[in-house]
Amino acid sequence: MKPLLSIVVPAYGSGAYLPRSLGSIARALSKVGPGLVEVLPEVDPKEGDDSDLVIDSFRGDIELFSPCFHKVRSGLLSSRLSGAERAKGSYVAFLDADDYVDESAFLSLLPILAKEGPDVLSYSFYLSKGGKSLGRYPFSSSFKGSGQKLFASFFLDIGTRGFMWTKAYRRELLLGYDGPFLSAFEDVCFNAIVLPKAKTSIAIRKPIVYYEEGNPDSLTSQRDPSRYLSHVTAFAAARAYYDLHSMEREKLVLRSHAWRMRLSFLYARKKAKEDGMGRAEKEKADRLFKATIDLSKPLFQSVPEFEETYFSFLKKPERSPS
């Protein structure tokens, strides 16, 4: 019998956090029957990191456990999708190595996936710092509907967020991904492309994951004067994909939620300015966003230089498993 759910755990320099994340999975697995969930660590190499030793120590604690160690680093999205390619489960969910799951995670998810069979199941999360819960993210609604409903909710933050680690996807949705591979805000672009392709979706308010805010090595904790431009680029890349694939309905949804994107950008712009963003980069991001929500002509006509940028993102990073 194949598992219902595969959990992909991408790791890069994560030896200090993996005992907690994998330990939380093992405890959650103890609450459900055997053979239902497989765990797939995807490890990119980093000098001085002992992720391989930590992962080996869990081989006896997790029944369906299949780590993959890579010789070269290729990025978070590539690691996640590499795990999805190896997965045997009907559904694939993701857990970042510095985060961890609630003990009732699989008790909550598996019955919905088995009985309802949505293409995407979205769930809430707890905020955590240093392993201590700071409370749950305040989603205002739960719902069942089309992928388009979840897609619209993704812009509003009312029932889902742009993160890949707050969703279980039907595996086929992931295998068909043909969009950009970004190095920042990759979840945003990925979900903007994949969610509209789902036929059915469910969003629940139940928190499943603890999101760790206290990791000083996390990209979100690093100084980044390009944060604002990177955030805008994620939506611009999705808009370019819509243009190239004649996704007119998705462009209208994006345009109608421009006000919400502006609110999201306020934080990214503020942080980028604090980190040293220059005037030229701010103006570049402003221009790109204005073009992204202008549906009167294709994005590449409004910002010709973005065409080369976009197609450079389509080159899937090379992976070399050891």
Image: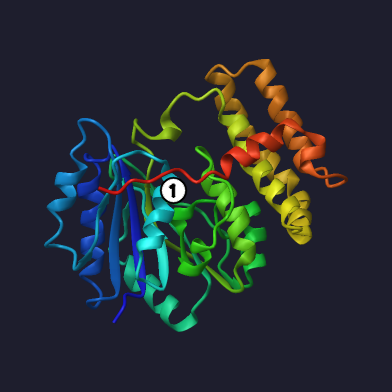
Q: Residue at x 83, y 47 (%)?
A: 295
Amino acid at circle 1: Ser
Q: In the visual, does 42 lie left or right of 161?
A: left
Residue 232 in view, yes or no:
no
Quadrant for the N terminus in the image: bottom left
Task: Please state the total of marks drawn on the protein image.
Answer: 1
Q: What percent of the width, then of the height, locates residue 42?
A: 31, 51
The front one of 130 and 182 is 182
How was this image coloured?
rainbow
In this rendering, the answer to whether 57 lies above or below 223 is: below
Say which of 21 and 39 sits in front.
39
User: Which residue is most to the right?
Assistant: 296
**Relative image position of residue 55 (x, y in whole percent):** 18, 51
Q: Residues within 10 Å of mark 1 (few under 14, many from 20)?
A: many
Give percent across and percent down for residue 116.
Answer: 49, 81
Question: Quadrant of the rendered structure where residue 261 is?
Answer: top right
Q: Is 140 situated left or right of 6 in this image?
A: right
Q: Secondary structure at mark 1?
A: helix
Residue 239 appears in view: yes
Residue behind mark 1 = 78
Q: Position of residue 230 (x, y in %)?
A: 59, 34
Is 172 on the left-hand or right-hand side of 57?
right
Image height of 219 relative to 19, above or below: above
Tell me the residue at 77%/41% (across/down).
299
Q: Nearer the viewer, residue 24 or 296?
A: 296
Q: Residue at x 50, y 25 (%)?
A: 224
Residue 90 sits above or below residue 176 on the image: below
